[in-house]
Amino acid sequence: MFIDDPVLMSRLLTLLTLSFHIFYATVGVGLPLMIMLFHWLGIKKDDIHYILMARRLAKGFVVTVAVGVVTGTAIGLQLALLWPNFMQLAGHIIALPLFMEVFAFFFEAIFLGIYLYTWDRFDNQKKHLLLLVPVAIGGAMSAFFITVVNSFMNAPGGFEMINGELANVNPLLAMFTVAMPTKVTHVLATAYMTIAFTLAAIAAFRLMKGSHKAYYKKSLNVMMKVGFVFAIAAAIIGDFSGKYLAEHQPEKLAAAEWHFETDEQAPLILWGILDENNEVKYGIEIPFALSILAHSDPNAEVIGLDQFPEEHHPPLIIHYFFDTMITIGMFMLTLSFVFLVARWRNWTFVDKKWYRWLIVMGAPLSFLGIQAGWWMSEVGRQPWILRGIMTVDEGATTASHVDLVFFFFVLLYLILGVGTIVVLRKMFKDKPVEKELESYAGGDEQ
Amino acid sequence: MSLEIIGITVLWLFLFFYIIVGSIDFGAGVFNAHSIINGKQHVLSKVIQRYLSPVWEVTNVFFVFFFVGIIGFFPDSAFLFGSVLLVPASISIILLALRGSYYAFESYGSQGHRGYAFMYGATGILIPASLSVVLTISEGGFVYMDDGQPVLSYELLFTSPLTWAIVVLSIVAVLYISSVFLTWYASKTEDQEATGIMRKYVLIWAVPLIVAAGGIIFELQNHNSAHFDSILNLWWMFALSFVLWAVTLWLIWNKRKYGLAVWLMIGQFAFAFFGYGISHYPYLLYPYLTIYDGFTNEAMAISLIVVFILGMMLLLPSLYLLLRLFLFDPKYVKGKRE
C-alpha cells in the first residue's frame, strides 16, 4: 500500500511497539519497589507523608499498568505475526521463559488488584504492605524472563544444529546463556534508577511550583539516594556488559565504538562523526579506555570490524545510541552524587532553581537512556534475529499489508500515549497533596 | 495420555476460562453502554463496576496465556497462524488495547464519560467477533499455500456463511453468558431492579444462542464434512449441553437458584466447547497442521508442563484470595466496602 516491504515494515513496527512499551514496562518494573519503599518508610517513621506517597503512586500506577498490559499483549502477539519463521524456531528452544513470564505477570496483576482495593481493610498496615512484595517480585521476574529471551537472541545456546535440524534442546540451558547475567541485571538496575530519578524530577518540579514543601522534599531526598545507588549499579554492570560483548559479540562492541581495526591499547571514542574514509572526526578520545572496558587491561587487544565479513557488520549508527546511553548514565550519576554530597555538607546550591531544573531534566533523560540502550542492543544485533543462526530477513513474515497494520498501530499508540498523559495529569491535579493531607488531618477517609 | 494431548487439553481449558471470564467482562460493557443510552445507568453501572474493577487484568492474562502456550507447545502453529492472522489478529489487538486502557482511563481518571462507555461497549461486541475468525480459519478452506508460504483468502473468508454464523454465535454467547452471571451477581447485591433487567436479557438471548449454535453445525456439514461427522460421533456431549441450557433457562424463568443457574450455564458451555474441541482433533488447522506434526520437542514439552504445574500451585491460592476478597465477600458485594 505505502511501502511494500514486509521485512522493513516488520522491523519498523517492532521498533515502534517495543519503544512504546518500554516506557510502561520500565514503570511496571521500577515503580512497585518505590511504592514499597515509601509505604515501609511511612510505617517505620509513622509519617503520613510517606504513606500518602505510596497511596498516590499506587493510584497512578494502575493507569500505566493498564497500558503496559495491552502493549505487552501486542508485542507478544506481534512476535508471531511479524516474525512467524523466527517464532517457529524459537518456540522449540526458548518458549519456556515466555511461558513463565505470563505466570509472573499474572501473579503481579492479582496482588496489585488486591493491594489497591484494600487500603482500609487491614487493621495492621504491615499486612497490607506485604501485598506489595509479590507485586514487586512479579514485576522484576517479568523483566527477568523477557530479558532472558532477548539474551538468547544475542547468544543462542541450549541446543545443537545437526544438518540444519534442531537437536538436544535443553530449555534450561537456553535460558542461562552467557549474555543473560549482564543483560538482566542491567535492565533491572536501569529501570529502578530511571523510576527513582523520574520521581525525583516530579518532586523537584512541584517544589519549584511551590507545592507542599515537606512532602516533596522528603520524596526528593529519598529518590535521589535510591537513584544514585542504582546508577552506580548500572555503571558497574555496564562495565561487565562491555566485557561480555568483547568476549562473545565483538562485532557489536566494535560497531558501537567505531573500532574498525583490531588493535592493542585501543582508545574509547565518544561521539564524533565519520568521514568518507571511515575516519573519526571531532570525537573525544580516551586513551586505553576501550581496552580497559573490554578486558580490564590497557594493553589488551580488542577485535575490530575487520575480522567480520561486511554483510555481518551491525549498522554504525549504534555508536550514537551507545554514547547517548553512557553519557546520560554518567550525567545522572554525577548529578545525584553532587546532590547527596551537598545535602551532607549542607550546601544550598542544590536547592537553587538551576539545579532543580537539572533534576527535572533527569526524567526524560533517563528514559531516553533506556531507549538508547535498547536501540543499541537490538540494532546492534543486525543482521541477525538469532545471532549466527537466522537473519531478520529470514525470520520476517511474507504477508502483505504490514504497512497498513503499522499505520494503525501508530494511531493506537498515539491515542494511548496522549490518554495516559491526560488522565494522569487530571488525576493528580484534581487531588493535590494538600487536599489529600487535609482529609487525613480531619480524621476522615473517603 | 500423550504429551500432545496434555498440552492441547491445558490450552483448551485456558481458552475456555478466557471465554467465560472474558464474556462476562465483554457483555457487562455492552449492557452498561446500553443502559446509559436508555438512561437507566444508575441501576446497572454500580453492579458492573463493582465486579469489573478488581478482576479486569486477570481476564486479559488468560488470553495471553493461551497464545503464548500454543506457541510453546506447538511452534509450527506460530508459523502457520502467525503468517495468516496478521490483519485479523492486529485488529483484535488494537480493540483489546483500546478497551483495556480506556477502562483504566475511565474508572481511575474521568468517570462517567458517555463516549468512553459507548466505545467500551462497542469493543465488547467487536472483540469476540474478530477473535472468533480464528476458529473459522482453523476449519480450513480459507488458507492456501503459495510457494511454501500460507496465504489467507479474505474473499473466501468474508463471503462464507460459516464465518458469519460463527461471528453471530460469538456475540450472542457473550451476551448470554454475561447476563446469566450478572443476574446472579445483581441478586447477590440485593438489587431487585438490576436483577430484573439482567434476567430479561437472559430470556432474550437464550433462544438466539441455540439457533446460532445449530446454524454452525449445519454450515459445517457443507464446509468441512470430516469435522461435521466427528461432531455427530460426539452427539451426546452436545445433547448434554442442550439439557443444561434448558435447565438454566427454566431456573431463570422461574426466578429460582440463580447461583446454580450460573454453574449449569458454565457446564453447558464446557460440554459444547470441549465437544467442539475434541471433534476438531487432531487438527489445529485443517488440513495443514495437526497437534502431532506441529508439536515441540520432548524436553520443552516436559518443562512447560512442569512449569505449568508449579505456576498453578502459585496462582490458584492467589486467585482464590482475590475472589474471596471481592467477588464473594458479602460486604464488598453489597457495596459497603469501597
Image (spheres, rainbow, N blue to C red):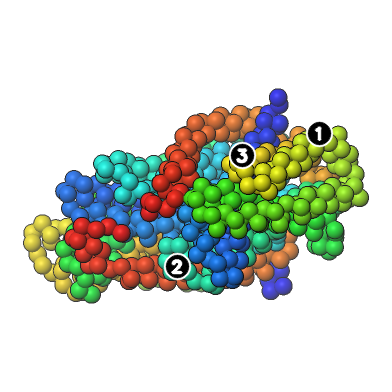
Protein chain holding label 2? B
| CA neighbours of label 1 inside 10 A, class few (<14), some (14 to 19), many (20+) | few
Q: Quadrant of residue A124?
A: top left
- Horizontally, residue B228 falls left or right of residue A103, namely right
Q: Residues within 10 Å of mark 3 (few under 14, many from 20)?
A: some
Residue A88 position, x and y percent, is 67, 45
Amino acid carrying mark 1 in the image:
Trp
**Residue B60 location, x and y as percent?**
56, 51
The kind of residue tagged 3 is Leu
Question: Would residue A207 be found to the left or right of residue A300 on screen?
Answer: left
- In the picture, the disc for residue B236 is 1
Q: CA distance from mark 1 to mark 3?
A: 22 Å
Q: Chain of mark 1?
A: B
Q: Earlier in the sequence, mark 2 or mark 1?
A: 2
Share a chain, discs 2 and 1?
yes
Chain letter of the residue carrying label 3:
B
Between label 3 and label 2, give the one nearer the viewer. Answer: 3
Mark 3 and 2 residues: CB-CB less than 8 Å, in contact? no
> Residue A138: x and y, percent?
42, 43
Residue position for label 2? B111
Classify mark 2: helix, strand or loop.
loop
Out of A287 and A116, give the one closest to the viewer: A116
Q: Amino acid at mark 2?
A: Gln
Q: In whole angstroms, how far apart are the C-alphas of marks 3 and 2? A: 34 Å
Instruction: Kindly identify which numbered label has been placed on residue B260.
Output: 3
Label 3 sits on a secondary structure element that is helix
Identified at 91% across, 50% down, the residue is: B222
Pointer 1 with pointer 3, Cβ within 8 A: no
Q: Residue A116's spot in the image, x, y percent? A: 38, 51
Q: Quadrant of the C terminus of chain A?
A: bottom left
In the image, residue A275 above or below residue B81: below
